[in-house]
Amino acid sequence: MKYFLERLRSVFRHSAEDGELQEELRAHAALLEEEHVQRGRSVEEARRLARLELGSAAALREEHAEVRGVPFLDTLRRDVQYALRSLRRDSGFTAFALLIGTLGIGACTAIFGIVNALLLRDLPVQDPGSLVWVAKENTGVAGDRSNVTVPVNPFIEFRRENKSFRDMAAYFAFYAPGDRKLTGTGEPERLTAIPVSNNFFRLLGVAPKLGREMSERGVSDECAGCGAERGVLEAAFRIRWRNCRKGDHAGQ
Amino acid sequence: MADRTEILQGTLDLMVLQTLQAMGPLHGYGIAKRIEQISDEALLINQGTIYLCLVRLVQKGWLKTEWGTSENGRRARFYSLSPAGRKQLKAETDNWQRVSGVIGKLLDLTAKG
């Protein structure tokens, strides 16, 4: 095992170890040459004989690399180095290919994020398995419930007479009517809000992180007759909120 | 049963270990020279192949290496036995002696028989 690890290490030190081998071979050749010179040969003859006795340096270096490394990884390393060199040579192509790849990855990530949030992930509520959406059957487009609404008073009636469900809550189906303008310090901003029934968060088992929920006060559609509105602020807004003001409701 | 190249390899390994124990630290030239002298040159195809054997023994942990200066002043790598190498040499030697003892006895019997 240790033997294998040593060979593995050698793969990463390929150039250095090859250089060391060459130095060893040079020293060896010099000693052989000297041996022949001492025996009376000329320098050129000695050099030729030494090279013969030592063998082909190129072949030896290759074989040595095979013995000391892990040949599969060696070839892999060489291929990767070659690929990187080629890419560096044609940098325009490389830049373009990287760009395409990045776009692809980005698009997939974005799509996955949406699919995950909408389809794959459990609803971030308590006991999502027991949550049901009640709506009047739409005689229009089959299966499309998104534009079916229930008037407020029937809803209150349903809730009071309800015997099948643990509780019932409602939310306002459209964005615009809930919007409020945020004034005070800094620029005025438009806040998007969705009016919900007072038991909305309690039903879902989701508690606000800061402050408290709305108390029992009856359903608010546009919160007619309840004076200043209380709202539960969305988390992302809360952070900016902390930075610039105190209080727990949006002023207007 | 080990095939021919493994047997040759094993013999060469043993000779290298034995050489270094007998003569102390040596560089590749010194080791190759002595092995050529002792064996009838069947073990080394050329002197360069000693380095294939040496790197294997180093990676197995039986040899240590150190850079030093050769007789003619060049930088050269010197090999010596590690403690594990000494143990390996002893084990191999004992094994050889046991095997040759057994074969000796066998040949004795065959001769008499």
Image (cartoon, coloured by chain):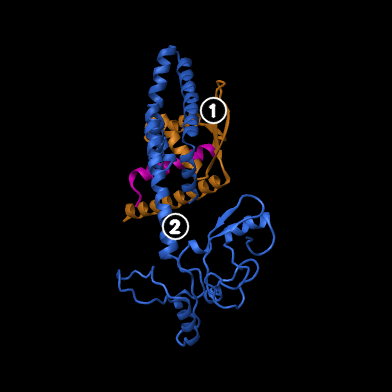
Chain colours: A blue, B orange
Where, quadrant-wise, is the C terminus of chain B in this rendering? bottom left
Q: Is residue B13 magenta?
A: yes
Disc 2 target residue: A113
On what subunit does the disc labeled 1 rest? B
Where residue A248 sits in the image (x, y, percent)? 66, 64
Disc 1 target residue: B76
Q: The disc labelled 1 sits on which kind of residue?
A: Ala
Residue at image x 61%, y 73%? A226
Residue at image x 43%, y 41%? A69
Where residue A205 sits in the image (x, y, percent)? 55, 74
Q: The disc labelled 2 sits on which kind of residue?
A: Gly
Tell me if residue A83 comes above or below residue A248 in the rendering: above
Tell me the magenta residue range.
Answer: B1-21
Position of residue A72 in the picture relative to residue A158 (left or right):
left
Where residue A159 sits in the image (x, y, percent)? 49, 83
Position of residue A109 in the picture relative to residue A233 (left or right):
left
Q: Nearer the viewer, residue B107 or A154?
A: A154
Number of labelled discs? 2
Quarter of the view holding residue A59: top left
Does residue A27 show up? yes
On what subunit does the disc labeled 2 rest? A
Name the front one of labels 1 and 2: 2
Distance Cα–Cα, label 1 vs label 2: 61 Å
Considering the whole magenta stretch, tell me its main secondary structure. helix
Q: Nearer the viewer, residue A27 or B86?
A: A27
Q: Does mark 2 fall on the same chain as mark 1?
A: no
